[in-house]
Image (cartoon, rainbow, N blue to C red):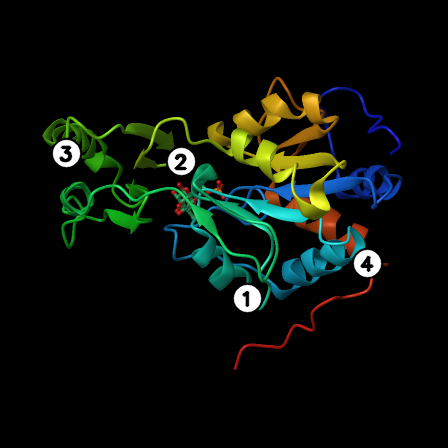
Amino acid sequence: MSSVDIARNEIVTPDTASAIFSRLDPAKIALLFDVDGTLIDIGPSPFEVDVSDELKESLSRLYERTQGALALVSGRPIRDLDLLFAPLRLPAVGGHGAETRLSEGAPVSRIEDLPEGLRRHLIEAAVPGSGIVYEDKGYSVALHYRKAPQEAERLRRHIAAGRAAFPDERTEVLLGKAMFEVKRPGVNKGDAVRRLMTEGQFVGRAPIFLGDDVTDESVFDILPELGGKGFGVGRHFPQTAGIFPSPADVRQALHLLARDAQPSVRLGTAS
Ligand SMILES: O=P(O)(O)OC[C@H]1O[C@H](O[C@H]2O[C@H](CO)[C@@H](O)[C@H](O)[C@H]2O)[C@H](O)[C@@H](O)[C@@H]1O
């Protein structure tokens, strides 16, 4: 693998990124991508986001080019990633590390669910008309207040009451982008990526990871031990090699990089 030779935390344009990455040996790297805020723009809610056919085509070509060593590393459940990126079913880490799938046909491994009573209490905060949106991921519950920032304090109190009602359950609150997520402690993307890199087509490769959020820092932290490099999107991280200004720049870089590779999946248009 040639080195990623740019000045530390330099702004990376689509052209420079595709020039840098095209010098890397695709047989020796793994491409790992956070989803929201990295590959796709942040939308008003989890269910109002756009994944373009062009992005799917780029990922499909790069998946082929790296012989399957490409994975999504997301806070979203893998079942939702499959819906968003259909017809692709990419290798994935989901739920901030709670779930992993090595390849398309492989089983999904996932941690145990939170008790139903706790989950029911948490989602009761999403009173109709309140603007609060919830995601019940089973092993965690996310409460989104992007459409109702004035509700953030009420949500904090509601979550504290729920956790107090289940004192024997080990939980922590993740502070995401306009959302609180009640999840199991000790589950993080970094540990999941470390495990992923010991499996199948990922073994022996150097991971290149792009991310934008606090939960991505656990991945940036472990990249040096794996000989990898990290890139931030839209913000500076102390551990990263460079910064893409926005998800649109990431998508354009992937488009340029993928241009010469052959597609592995023919993408149809939605009817
Ligand atoms: O690790 P990621 O792939 O970045 O996932 C993190 C969370 O992303 C989603 O929530 C965020 O994006 C939404 C859509 O753009 C936005 O409306 C919300 O405010 C953001 O927090 C997703 O819904 C969560 O499940 C992920 O944990």
Q: Which mark is residue 177?
A: 2
**What residue did someone put label 1 on?**
86
Position of 2 relative to 143 (above/below): above
Which of the marked residues, 4 or 1, is nearer the chain's N terminus?
Answer: 1
Please count the marks in the image. Answer: 4
User: How far is the residue under mark 3 from the one under mark 1?
Assistant: 35 Å
Circle 3: is it few (<14), some (14-19), or many (20+) Cα within 10 Å?
A: some
Q: Nearer the viewer, mark 2 or mark 1?
A: 1
Read off the residue under disc 3: 162
Amino acid type of the residue tagged 3 in the rendering: Gly
Disc 1 residue lies near ligand 1 with CB under 8 A: no
At x 35%, y 37%, the residue is 178
Q: Residue 90's quadrant in the figure?
A: bottom right
- Tell me where residue 52 appears, x and y as whole percent: 59, 62
Element on which disc 2 rests? loop
Q: Give above or below for 41 relative to 236.
A: below
Residue 59 at what x, y percent from top left?
68, 56
Which amino acid type is marked by label 2?
Answer: Lys
Q: Does the CB distance between marks 3 and 1 fall below 8 Å?
A: no
Q: Nearer the viewer, mark 3 or mark 4?
A: 3
Mark closest to the chain's N terminus, 3 or 4: 3
Read off the residue under disc 4. Answer: 259
**Neighbours of disc 4 within 10 Å: few (<14), some (14-19), many (20+):** some
Q: CA distance from mark 2 to mark 1?
A: 25 Å
Specify whether 157 is left or right of 9: left
Q: Is disc 1 surrounded by few (<14), some (14 to 19) or many (20+) residues within 10 Å?
A: some
- CA gap, disc 3 to disc 4? 50 Å
CB contact under 8 Å: marks 2 and 1: no
The residue that appears at 54% across and 29% down in the rendered structure is 190
**The residue carrying mark 2 has its beta carbon less than 8 Å from ligand 1:** yes
